[in-house]
Amino acid sequence: MNMNTVFIILFMVVIGAIIGGVTNSLAIKMLFRPYKPIYIGSWRVPFTPGLIPKRRDELATQLGVMVVEHLLTPETIQKKFMNESFQQEMTKLAQKELEQLLSNEESLEQLFTKLGYENRQEWIEKNFEHFLESKYDQLIEKYREIPIKSILSDELLEKMDSKIPQISRYILQKGAEYFSSVEGELRIERMVNDFVKERSGMLGNMMQMFLGNVNLTGILQKELLKFLNNEGTEELITTLLRKEWEKVLEWQAEKIEEQFGREQLVDTITRTVKKIIRVDRIFATPISVLAEPYKEKAIEKMAPQIVLMLGGWLSNKIEEMMERLHLADIVREQVESFSVERIEEMVLLITSRELKMITYLGALLGGAIGLLQGIFVLITG
């Protein structure tokens, strides 16, 4: 084989490689370019615009379908939500955010104001009153014809019954304190004087004759105190109170409302509950102070439970949520909003190495074909 033959073969290999490489490179370029159709007069030049610009709408639609049906499917997202490591990460995040919230030194009023909800205290108090009123109506309707003792628990009835002797003792104690005082003594004296005046006739003269200068007020005070401090008196008062209490327990809810009136009962209940639950103090207290008794329990126990419950709820609702989100349309609209230049940049960023290999492969195949052609020419020549 002389030098001329080698030159011919090398020439054909180089030409074939150039043609193969340039052809593949041109084909890759024609995927994106030209970006817009080219016209000569009214005649559009073939293969303009490039394949991807020409079919961008179809590409956007197919990308949306691919994302929804093969990438972001309800099953893959559900699997992610229920993944143990993911839940642990979410639990740590929830605990961190909850700790920051519960350590806030702002008051509830300040927090609501920052969130754009002013005068929340008045709103809560008003709704709280409506809530108590509606609860009262529900309960009174439910127990309208039922005796009170059927509503209260046995433990509560027993406890209330055990308090009756204490109430009797308290009443007698306060009565003894009153009649031992100067005010009580004056009250007895006025009562004695009124009694004598009302009987100013023969009976009154007889009483004055028998009693003479005896201090009737002191005698009555002494006897009254003796009566109040007597154990039998306490038993008597206890028996009377217990009998009256038994009568009250037989009352139906309807009778209670008739005795006191609906408006008065609702007002009494509302004022009592408001005294116990001071909404104004709660709103003026820093969140950190309100949350202090429950902070550790909330962070350690509530946060993981909330994450678990929320994960389960989202897992069950994810398919419906994805349908409502219309992810395919979102992807399609997003891709359609991209310029062709950006699409080209994105594709080349991902596949630049592979596209270069295709160009080199074209050159390699072209060179191999040129080599075969050169050998074929030599054989046939």
Image: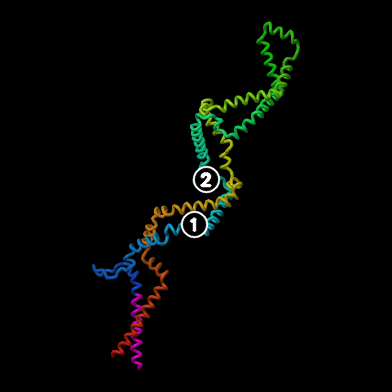
Q: Colour scheme in the image?
A: rainbow
Q: Going by the image, does 338 lie left or right of 100?
A: left
Q: Nearer the viewer, residue 367 or 342?
A: 367
- Above or below, 144 relative to 214: below
Question: Residue 45, position in %: x, y?
Answer: 27, 70
Q: CA distance from mark 2 to mark 1?
A: 34 Å
Within 10 Å of disc 2 (Cα), the crowding (few <14, some 14-19, many 20+) is some
Furthest residue toward right? 213
Residue corresponding to mark 1 = 82
Q: Residue at x 69, y 14 (%)?
A: 192
Span highlighted in magenta in the image: 1-25
Assign a secondary structure to mark 1: loop
326 is higher (above) or lower (below) than 204 = below
261 shown above or below 345: above
Count of marks, rendered view = 2
Percent position of residue 180, x then y = 72, 23
